[in-house]
C-alpha cells in the first residue's frame, strides 16, 4: 500500500491514486516474508498452521472385579479422532498407569487401570487420560467417576463418564 505522500503525488501529477499492483505489495514486510518463530507475529503463525484440531480419546466402558482383599478395574479407551494417538498415562483412584500405547484412528483397547483395596470413600471422582497426537500436541481427556455404595459400606465404580478435553 503506498504511503499518503505517494498517493498525493500521484493525484497531483494526474495519475490514478491506486493501481492494482499496490494491493499485491506486502503491507508489513516482516509478516509477509517472516519465517514462523523468527520475528513473525503470533497471529501469522496461527494463520499459517491453521486452527488447532482437538483429537478425542476417551474411556468407553469400565469393568471392575472383586479379587478377595481388594478389586481391580479395566477400562476400554477409544480413539475417536482421525489421527494416530500416543496414550501416555491414565490417572484413576489415586493411581497413575503408564499406558505407552499407540491407538490408530477408530481403534479401542482395554487396559488394567487399578488394582488395590476396596474403596471406602467416593471422594476421588476425577479420571484423566493423557495423550499426544501425531504432531506433538498434548491433550487430557477428563472423566467423572460415578460410584455405587455396597451393603458393607464400600463403594464400587459404576461408570466413568467423559466430561471434556483439555489442550495441555
Image (cartoon, grey):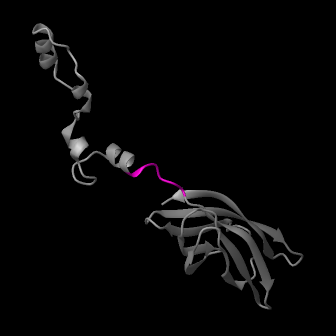
Residue 121 seen by the camera: no
The residue lying toward the viewer, choosing from 128 and 86, is 86
Magenta stretch, overall SS: loop
Query: Is 27 placed left or right of 13 in the picture?
Result: right
Residue 131 at x, y percent in the picture: 53, 69
- The image position of residue 46, as x and y in percent, is 38, 48
What's the residue at 34%, 49% (across, down)? 45
Residue located at (57% from left, 80% from top): 99
Vertical order, 14 against 113 (above or below): above
Rendered residue at 23%/48% (across/down): 34
- Outermost residue to the bottom: 68
**Rendering coords of residue 114 (x, y %):** 67, 81
- Which of the 4 quarters of the picture holds residue 93? bottom right
Q: Which residues are magenta?
A: 49-54
**In the image, 91: left or right of 12?**
right
Q: Is residue 114 above or below residue 80?
A: below
Q: Is residue 7 above or below residue 12?
A: below
Residue 52, magenta (yes or no): yes
Q: Which residue sits at x=25%, y=32%?
A: 24
User: Is residue 92 located in the magenta-colored stretch of the structure?
Assistant: no
Q: Locate residue 43 relative to residue 24 in the image: left or right.
A: right
Percent x, y for residue 153? 84, 75
Amino acid at each position: 500500500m503506498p504511503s499518503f505522500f505517494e498517493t498525493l503525488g500521484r493525484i497531483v501529477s494526474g495519475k490514478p491514486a491506486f493501481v492494482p499492483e499496490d494491493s499485491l505489495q506486502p503491507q508489513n514486510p516482516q509478516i509477509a516474508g517472516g519465517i514462523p518463530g523468527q520475528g513473525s507475529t503470533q497471529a501469522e503463525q496461527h494463520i499459517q498452521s491453521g486452527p488447532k484440531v482437538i483429537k478425542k480419546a476417551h474411556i468407553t466402558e469400565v469393568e471392575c472385579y472383586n479379587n478377595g482383599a481388594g478389586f481391580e478395574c479395566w477400562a476400554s479407551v477409544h480413539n475417536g479422532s482421525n489421527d494416530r494417538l500416543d496414550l501416555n498415562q491414565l490417572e484413576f483412584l489415586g493411581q497413575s498407569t503408564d499406558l505407552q500405547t499407540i491407538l490408530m484412528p477408530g481403534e479401542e483397547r482395554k487396559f488394567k487401570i487399578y488394582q488395590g483395596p476396596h474403596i471406602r470413600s467416593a471422594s476421588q471422582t476425577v479420571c484423566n487420560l493423557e495423550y499426544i497426537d501425531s504432531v506433538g500436541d498434548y491433550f487430557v481427556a477428563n472423566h467423572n467417576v460415578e460410584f455405587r455404595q455396597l451393603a458393607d459400606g464400600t463403594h464400587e465404580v459404576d461408570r466413568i463418564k467423559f466430561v471434556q478435553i483439555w489442550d495441555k
